[in-house]
Amino acid sequence: MRLSFIGAAHEVTGSCHLLEACGKNILIDCGMEQGPDLYENQELPVTAGEIDYILLTHAHIDHSGKIPLLCKEGFKGEIVTTFATADLCNIMLRDSAHIQEFEAEWRNRKAKRSGAEVYEPLYTMADADAAIQLLSPCDYDQKITLCEGIEVRFCDVGHLLGSASIEVWITEGDISKKIVFSGDVGNRNQPIIKDPQKVAEADYVVIESTYGDRTHGDEIPDYVGEFTRILRETFAKGGNVVIPSFAVGRTQEILYFIREIKEKNLLPEYPGFEVYVDSPLAIEATNVFNKNVKSCFDEDAMALVEQGINPLVFPGLKTTITSEESKMINFDDKPKVILSASGMCEAGRIRHHLKHNLWRSECTICFVGYQAIGTLGRKLIEGAECVKLFGENITVNARIESLKGISGHADMNGLLDWLKGFEKKPQRVIVVHGEDTVTDHFASLVEETIGCPAFAPYSGGAVDLAANEILTEGVKVPKKAVEKPARAKAASAFNRVVAAAKRLLEVVYKNEGLANKDLAKFESQIMNLADKWDREE
């Protein structure tokens, strides 16, 4: 009984864990690394053809995106997951393959001109199709005998349609152990999908720590009220509201809110405003949501369904598939909402919509999700006055709005609350899927709060489950350009300080009108802070 950690070890993406038990090799997730990549991942100690099963927590590419590569290398086993995750993988893995092939084609056009070597895509559409053929979906809460000595069950963890934590029971001889893999734990009170379901018992818990060092805040934002305000103010100026949105999950949440705005007639002065979903992937994903209503929707969404109301459809909703249809959106002068991918503005049709709307002072760009450092979305939120799109400098005149608190991830308190659902303390908690220092921080927090041993392995870390022994904590191997992660880390820390300063300024403006006595106290505290950190030139 050995559990090894290959990906998302002291890193946020690329989840991949290997369970060796009962003569079988089982992967829990097989994700692609996205964004910052600080450490080298160790190689899997078995070949792709020797892997018997993949247990997939959910469809996000950082958990599923390398499965087609595994198929390319010889994997022919079962991919066990929920029905909704299987449906989403059917479109998301194909989309990922399309991106791989497109990038290879683009690179090879350049290589042909320069005489460089031919670039091979990571995998092809045929590899994605092969992976999809191996999907073996199951229902939530259905206990399955995977093979002799191993049973599994998928529990709704409220992160994404179809997302699950996975319970795994192992019996070898007279030794029995239970491991629970959290997957990505969802945020409570999200629209459409259910809150995370807790698990009662486990010997070992492998838990993510994406937000393991921060909270979303105690107050639940009034998303419908905020959207109504943004739409009213923008439409009154004759502008468009452009929403960069992730195709799966976030787009459907926004549709849910807009349907409520229309149903309650919260914008009576603009009753027929149009909403364009300009993303083929988002359109397909919305169809998957509609297909998995009974198993995945929460009570509020189901109440609408039982009244014959589709919570994701409303008058004025328009979808565009072809690039020609997409281009025509910006030739229509009527104020409208444009939902388009990608969510961080790094690729896709959203960049065309930004080109047409960023320079217009009457328009609003509304961000509804996390924007990673270095992305175009992050630059816009941080106040960029000019950005380059398709080789052209675009002046940022549009208003930039960001709706706080829309997150599919549980925060630090949510993760701890999910862990407290275990009625008996686990023998050990293993922390993965978090930023470098966050994983260690959250492991310490688990020990203090839950009262059981916890550690955060590096890639290659392994645990003997039968003996409850850490065999190795893994190998901390920085990427070849050692100085780059250090610089990136410093830049990240500085950017967080800048963000904190901007938040302080927001707080200052919110306190306009406060009594003079309180304002004087506030001023004194700010000046003391400035004096403490002021550096000589």
Image: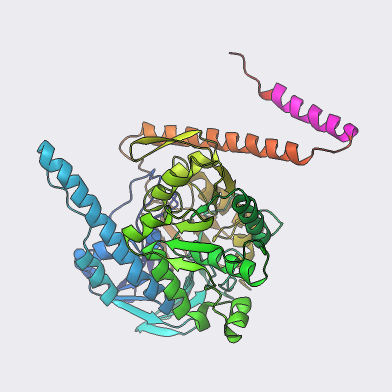
Can residue 122 be seen from the camera position used here?
A: no
Q: In the rendered image, which quarter is residue 266 located in?
A: bottom right
Looking at the image, which residue is at 42% across and 44% down? 355
What range is drawn magenta here? 516-531
In the rendered view, how is the structure colored? rainbow
Whole-percent x and y of residue 211? 56, 53
The stretch drawn in magenta includes residue 361: no
- Quarter holding the C terminus is top right
User: Foreground residue, 146 or 376?
Assistant: 376
User: Is residue 83 in view from this perspective?
Assistant: yes
- Eyeballing the image, is 60 above or below 444? below
Residue at 55%, 77% (x, y): give it: 297
In the displayed structure, 472 sits above or below 464; it is above
Where is residue 199? Give x, y as percent.
57, 74
Residue 141 horizontal side relative to residue 307, left or right: left
Nearer the observer, 174 or 365: 365
Indicate left or right for 469 with 504 as reference.
left
Residue 111 rendering spot, x and y as whole percentages:
14, 41
Predominant SS of the magenta segment: helix
Q: Is residue 498 above or below residue 22?
A: above
The image shows a total of numbered marks equal to 0
Quarter placement of the N terminus: bottom left
Q: Residue furthest top?
A: 537
In the image, residue 525 lies in the stretch drawn in magenta: yes
- Tell me the residue at 55%/36% (across/down): 383
Find residue 4 and report its horizontal and vertical position in percent.
37, 60
